[in-house]
Amino acid sequence: MRIFWSRAQTATNLDIEQIVRAHYDDVWRFCARRVGYDLAADAAQDTFITAHQRLASFQSRSTVKTWLLGIALNQCRNSRRKQASQVAEPWLEEGFQGSSPSPESSVLDRVELRKALQKLTPEHREVVLVHEVDGLTYQEAAELLGIPVGTVKSRLHHAFLQLRAALQPHQEAAI
């Protein structure tokens, strides 16, 4: 269920319960990829509390989902700062989608992929996550991260070049 409204309408016409029902799963998965399963529910809950508090100031410049993911991104960043130890990248763990891993899963070793991603700058890593893992469009990623669309494309290009270079020796060894 997606919630859309015209620019003439305001977000205050929406019920926060409708927004939660429509977007909770997406927000929880987004948070789980960044802070892990254990902290995802708290981050998602904090996201919707913040959204409820700021609902009247929502200006419809983006979709509700993109707006919520922006709030969730900030909640996850705050949550990770509070954690003394770095949480492993949970979105790389086996079966993250809630089902068993498919037999067609990537040939790449997840450990090597995790290492290659950790070598990226935080800006490059985040744009790869929101575009490739979360499935946001270039425009949605730009809105979420507060950067121009061209910057999203540029960061993705450079991140993929770095990932390709880092993973090249491992791909050749697997052949």
Image: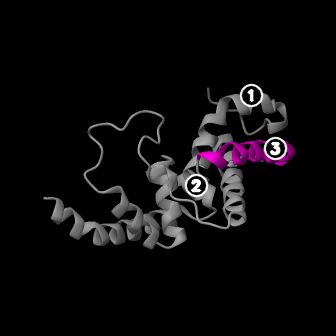
Q: Which amino acid does label 3 sit on?
A: Ile
Q: Which of marks 1 and 3 is nearer the N terminus?
A: 1
Query: Residue 61 location, x and y as percent?
Result: 70, 49
Point out residue 50 in the picture as x, y percentages from the top left corner: 81, 48
Count residues near mark 2 (Cα–Cα under 10 Å), then give few for <14, some for 14-19, many for 20+.
many
Q: Considering only vertical position in the picture, is 153 above or below 52?
A: below
* Mark 3, other Cα within 10 Å: few <14 / some 14–19 / many ≥20: few
Q: Which of 160 and 39 is in front in this view?
A: 39
Q: What stretch is highlighted in magenta?
A: 37-58
Q: Name the residue under label 2.
A: 34
Q: Which mark is residue 7?
A: none
Residues under numbered marks 3 and 2 in contact, where contact means CB atoms less than 8 Å apart = no
Secondary structure under badge 2?
helix
Mark 3 or mark 2, which has the lower sequence index? 2
Q: Residue at x 40, y 67 (%)?
A: 115
Q: Per the image, is 55 magenta?
A: yes
User: Which quarter shows the C terminus?
Assistant: bottom left
Rendered location of residue 139, percent (x, y): 54, 53
Describe residue 57's horizontal placement relative to residue 6 as left or right: right
Instruction: Please state which of residues 19 and 146 is positioned toward the viewer in this rendering.
Output: 19
Q: What residue type is labelled 1?
A: Gln
Residue where numbered disc 1 is placed: 18
Residue pictured at 55% horizontal, 50% vertical: 33
What's the residue at 54%, 70% (across, down)?
A: 122
Write down the residue under mark 3.
49
Dividing the image into 4 quarters, which one contains the N terminus? Answer: top right
